[in-house]
Image (tube, grey):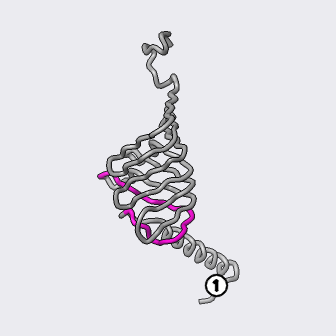
Amino acid sequence: MKFPAKKQLAIAALGILLVLTFARGFAQTNGSGSAGVSGTVAGLRLPLSWWDNGKLKSQLLADKAKVPDNGAIYASGVTGEFYAVTGELDVTITTDDCTYDRESKLVKSDSRVKIERNDVVITGKGFEWNANEQLVMITNDVKVVMSRSMLRKDDIIKGKKK
């Protein structure tokens, strides 16, 4: 069957888009925590856990990652995302770089880290994120900033009523 030139161009563009989408999906990881490819990967997306209802619970995103056949993944330009059971993004963690041990599901970094949730921002240097326990521990220079909107009218801030 012969198509007009415009349709042929549209079909070719769709084919290229599908190939690129497949290639990106292949470069991302499967749900078991093991990478689908080895080597250097751009745009890594590593799902770590799911809620009982099948929705994503947490994932690790990286601008660039070194993924060996076995052992820890080294990632840079990292964002960790935690989702509510309803599927909405709840908490984000950002850092310059980290390592992810696929076997223990432990993310570690000595870099600066920032954790954000609603009106709370926690920063520090160095952290460990246990994906099994859904626990994040910042190890140094911890600072917590909360907005006043988090406090009820009756709460007292530094001895003064709001």
The residue sitting at 49% across, 40% down in the picture is: 115
Relative to residue 63, is residue 88 depicted above or below? above
Q: Is residue 108 left or right of residue 95?
A: left
Tell which residue pokes out farthest to the top in this image. Answer: 160
Tell which residue pokes out farthest to the left in this image. Answer: 52
Q: Is residue 2 left or right of residue 151?
A: right
Write down the residue under mark 1: 3
Relative to residue 119, is residue 3 depicted above or below? below
**Residue type at the position of mark 1:** Phe
Q: Which residues are magenta?
A: 33-52
Toward the viewer: 35 or 128? 128
How dense is the environment of label 1, judged by Cα within 10 Å: few (below 14), some, or many (20 and up)?
A: few
Q: Tell whether position 133 is magenta.
A: no
The residue sitting at 63% across, 88% down in the picture is: 2
Toward the viewer: 132 or 83? 132
Relative to residue 143, is residue 137 depicted above or below? below
Residue 52 image point, x, y percent: 29, 52
Toward the viewer: 112 or 133? 112
Q: Is residue 18 left or right of residue 30?
A: right
Q: Quadrant of the N terminus?
A: bottom right
Residue 77 image point, x, y percent: 57, 54
Can residue 89 be seen in the rendering of this structure? yes
The residue sitting at 45% across, 59% down in the picture is: 46
Can residue 119 be seen in the rendering of this structure? no
Relative to residue 7, is residue 75 depicted above or below? above
Q: Tell whether position 34 is magenta.
A: yes
The residue sitting at 36% across, 46% down in the picture is: 134
Rendering quarter of residue 21: bottom right
The prevailing secondary structure element of the residues shown in magenta is strand
Rendering quarter of residue 35: bottom left
Identify the secondary structure beneath mark 1: loop
